[in-house]
Amino acid sequence: MRRFLPYFPFLLLLLAAPVAAQETAKPEPPQHTFLWKVEREGLATSWLFGTIHVPDDRINALHPAVKAALEGADAFYGELALDSTEELGKQVLAAGTFEEGHDLREVVSDELWERLDQRLQKHGMSAAMLRRFKPFLVNLTLVQLDMLPLIQSGKKALDERIFLVAKAKGKEVGGVEQVEEQIQALAYTLTLEESVASLSQGLDDMDKADARGVSDLERIMRAWLTGSGRLLLAIGMESWDLNDPVDQRSRKALLLDRNVHMAERTARKLTQAPEKSFVFAFG
């Protein structure tokens, strides 16, 4: 079961010291992008931009059409308001940390603990560093490991970078979700036992990626750069078993229900301020 998870870079920065950024040649903007025009009589033209939550230069090199939409818009809304990632971090950590006197070692087998430790050692870390984390937060950390060098160098994910630029230019900014809603979907959809099984599955997926020679994150980024929604969806759905009740419940909470809420709130923003041009950017 692959989870489409939010991007919380502070998790890794808590565990590894930042490093100096290295100068690299900036990539050319992508030839394709996920940008939809929103038009309706009586409303200013607005835009929906499908992003990917990574601080990779290939992703951050915006397509000219995206740049033009952002420049001409009055307001920018992402999934979350990203004014303070520090505050977001506090809330996620509070939900994802065991109570005093309990830890991850109590709920995972010796074999799973050893597998987790071996995986983290490849990135200069250890399972002991995540001992206080609940399984869902360990999973959230694992899926970001490939981004560790970029995060350490101070690079920001696409959504956060656009949010901060829009704010600096005096545009209206915000989010259509609350962090509590994302935490609810992440932390409380599965039981503790199901979360442990999901952690094991996540490590299985990483082992398969090692054998394939390319990580799932890299495959998703390459698919995004092609502009093919069909390819992106196919990769994203590989690890979901739609006949499994646990996967059904997880997918509903993380994807389907959130999509409905975001669509409703986006429509409300448009109709409440018909004179404003919005860019909505969701991962």
Image: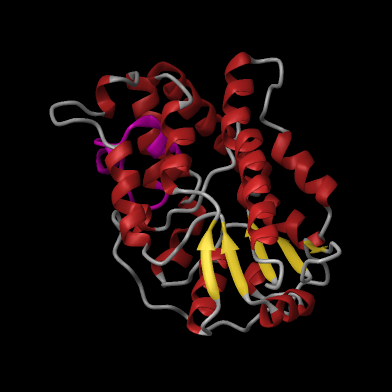
Q: Position of residue 209 (x, y in %)?
A: 62, 41
Q: Which colour scheme is used?
A: secondary structure
Q: Give the quarter of the image for residue 15.
A: bottom left
Q: Residue 132: say if magenta.
A: yes
Image-based side of 195 in relation to 42, left or right:
left
**Is residue 68 visible in the rendered structure shown here?**
yes
Q: Position of residue 131 (x, y in %)?
A: 26, 35
Q: Is residue 72 above or below residue 271?
A: below
**Is residue 50 visible in the rendered structure shown here?**
no
In the image shown, does 55 or 119 lie closer to the viewer?
55
Q: Which residue is drawn at 71% across and 67% down?
A: 274
Which region is colored magenta?
122-139
Q: In this view, does 164 lie above or below 2?
A: below
In the image shown, does 164 or 74 lie closer to the viewer?
74
Q: Residue 112: say if magenta.
A: no
Image-based side of 180 in relation to 47, left or right:
left
